[in-house]
Image: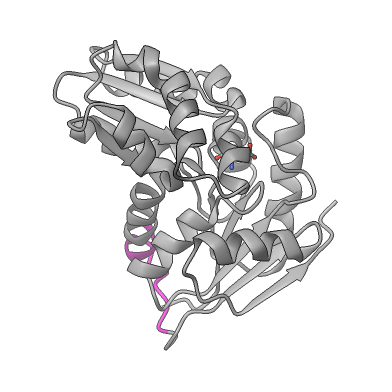
Amino acid sequence: MDNRPIGVFDSGVGGLTVVNALSKILPNESICYVGDTARVPYGNKSKNSIIKFSKEITQWLLKQDCKIIIIACNTASSLALSYLESNLSIPIIGVIDPGVDWALLNTKNKKIGVIGTRATINSNVYNIKLKNKDREISVFSKACPLFVPLVEEGFISGEIPLLLSNYYLSELKKTGIDTLILGCTHYPLLNKMIGRVLDSSIKLIDSSLATSDLVKKKLEVNNLISNNKDGEINCFVTDDAKNFQFVLERFYNLNINSINQINVF
Ligand code: DGL
């Protein structure tokens, strides 16, 4: 048994999709969440900046005595996971590998689509990981940079997201994919809209669900499961907490114990 918290971080509020999934399958675990709201978005930043930001946050999470760290951000997982893995003494999990594994389990025709931020798509990491596991897979990627601000402004249904989804997904529609990885924390909030635009038979892979499943297995295998009665969720942000709270209340039905501003850089 290990009652230390799980450390989770993202560039902002999007990683709460992972916290949401974790709190459902691991209700006894306490979570210490960092949203780097002062430096969001990561999706248009360089690899060096993303590694630097991720390093600063993981160091802060280590000081909170976390037992495992989850990078609940596709961009940071794409660009900083391998650096962090080789420099940390506790387990660390990103959101890319779980999404890749679920996609491979679901595809029948071996044609997989990936959508994400520009940094994630340009890193080519999904393409590399999918093909490393199955050489016969064809990958069709598309950066959808405007989806993040769209979600943060509250547009998850209606005319504007429909227009933008048609714009971004029209090429993917012609590829014959049977599986689409939602390779960005915010995209599961648009899954109804994306499902409306694409053929309804296309399986949408929500990395937050795939990741929480893997975290549970990892905690069990390493004897790190908590026996707390109820897990606490404490959030820490690097900018004023108001906007974070606004998006949190609008989209997530989460029981948060506290939100505090911190300085990690
Ligand atoms: N969290 C980021 C991701 O999953 C999206 C927001 C950002 O660009 O920082 O890629």
What colouring does the structure picture have? one colour
Instruction: Tell me which secondary structure the magenta stretch mostly adopts.
Output: loop
Using residue 11 as the reference point, say whether residue 77 is left or right of it: left
Name of the residue lying farthest toward the left = 108
Residue 83 appears in view: yes
Q: Assess whether residue 251 is covered by the magenta stretch.
A: no
What is the x, y in percent for residue 131? 33, 17
What is the x, y in percent for residue 191? 37, 42
Q: Residue at x 33, y 67 (%)?
A: 25
Q: Which residues are magenta?
A: 218-227
What is the x, y in percent for residue 76? 61, 38
- Ligand 1 is found in the corner quadrant, namely top right
Q: Assess whether residue 225 is covered by the magenta stretch.
A: yes
Q: Is residue 77 above or below residue 228?
A: above
Residue 101 appears in view: no
Looking at the rendering, which quadrant does residue 174 occupy?
A: top left
What is the x, y in percent for residue 195? 30, 36
Q: Is residue 196 above or below residue 37?
A: above
Q: Residue at x 51, y 76 (%)?
A: 255
Q: Residue at x 65, y 63 (%)?
A: 246
